Amino acid sequence: MRRLGAGTSGRMSDVHITPNGDGWAVEVDGDERETFETQEEAIERGREVAEAEEGELVVHGQDGQIRDKTSHGNDPRDVPG
């Protein structure tokens, strides 16, 4: 497993969980940052990063298609519905 570097950019970043060979990658703004054996491990770490970055967690399936998105910051409070 590769680890994310310390510190953040001070801006919202999208965090993607993508298939990577036999494992899963956590990508921030298109740069692969860490790899994990299971998607569950990658999602757990990706959620931590998305919360710290106040960005969106985007989970891709094995086929590469987006299967889930979760926002972790900067959500408008006065949205009807």
Image (cartoon, helix red, strand yellow):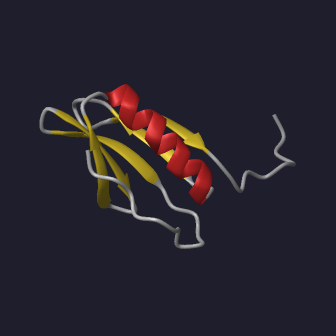
Which residue does the image show at 52% across and 41% down from the upper left? 47
| Position in image of residue 65 (x %, y %) | 30, 36
Residue 50 falls left or right of residue 20: right
Picture layout, residue 52 above or below residue 24: below
The foreground one among 55 and 42 is: 42
| Position in image of residue 68 (x %, y %) | 47, 33
| Quadrant of the drawing holding the N terminus | top left
Q: Is residue 67 visible?
A: no
| Position in image of residue 42 (x %, y %) | 37, 37
| Quadrant of the drawing holding the C terminus | top right
Looking at the rendered structure, the number of numbered marks drawn on it comes to 0
Residue projecting furthest to the right? 78
Q: Is residue 76 visible?
A: yes
The foreground one among 17 and 66 is: 17
Residue projecting furthest to the left? 21
Which residue does the image show at 45% across and 43% down from the upper left? 46
| Position in image of residue 25 (x %, y %) | 28, 44
Picture layout, residue 1 above or below residue 37: below
Residue 65 falls left or right of residue 12: left
The foreground one among 6 and 65 is: 6
Which residue does the image show at 33% across and 29% down from the upper left? 39
